[in-house]
Image (cartoon, rainbow, N blue to C red):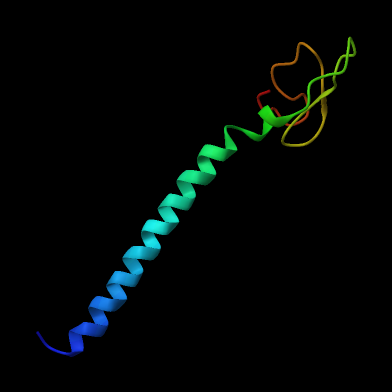
Amino acid sequence: MYPEFIAIYAGLAVALVLLIVIVILQICILKNSGGSPASHRPPARGGQSSAVFCRNCAARLGASDKVCPQCGTPR
């Protein structure tokens, strides 16, 4: 084996270890997030109705609106 290749193999080993660590961290983050950010909203208090806003333009949506009346984004 040529001595020049030792540095190349060491670099490849370090890169492989970093890649494995990154993949493991991404899996942990995905497991901890649990879903979409919309699922982390607090529940409405008592009998009060909570207002719903468009996630794109922040316009207030009516109870029966399926799409935003201003920008057309689905609810």
Question: Which residue is rendered at x = 23% and y = 77% of the image?
Answer: 9
Residue 9 as seen in the image, left or right of residue 46:
left
Give coordinates of residue 19: x percent, y percent.
Answer: 38, 60
Location of residue 29 (image quadrant): top right
Give coordinates of residue 25: x percent, y percent.
Answer: 48, 52
Residue 15 as seen in the image, left or right of residue 74:
left
Residue 2 as seen in the image, left or right of residue 10:
left
Give coordinates of residue 17: x percent, y percent.
Answer: 35, 64
- Above or below, 45 against 9 in this view is above
Question: Where does the N terminus fall, quadrant-wise?
Answer: bottom left
Location of residue 4 (image quadrant): bottom left
Question: Which residue is rendered at x = 74% and y = 25% of the image?
Answer: 68
Question: Which residue is rendered at x = 41% and y = 52% of the image?
Answer: 23
Residue 53 as seen in the image, left or right of residue 16:
right
Give coordinates of residue 43: x percent, y percent.
Answer: 79, 21
Location of residue 8 (image quadrant): bottom left
Q: How many marks?
A: 0
Residue placed furthest toward the left: 1
Question: Where does the C terminus fall, quadrant-wise?
Answer: top right
- Above or below, 72 against 9 in this view is above
Question: Which residue is rendered at x = 78% and y = 29% of the image?
Answer: 70
**Viewer-side residue, 7 vs 75:** 7
- Above or below, 6 against 24 in this view is below
**Viewer-side residue, 69 vs 18:** 18
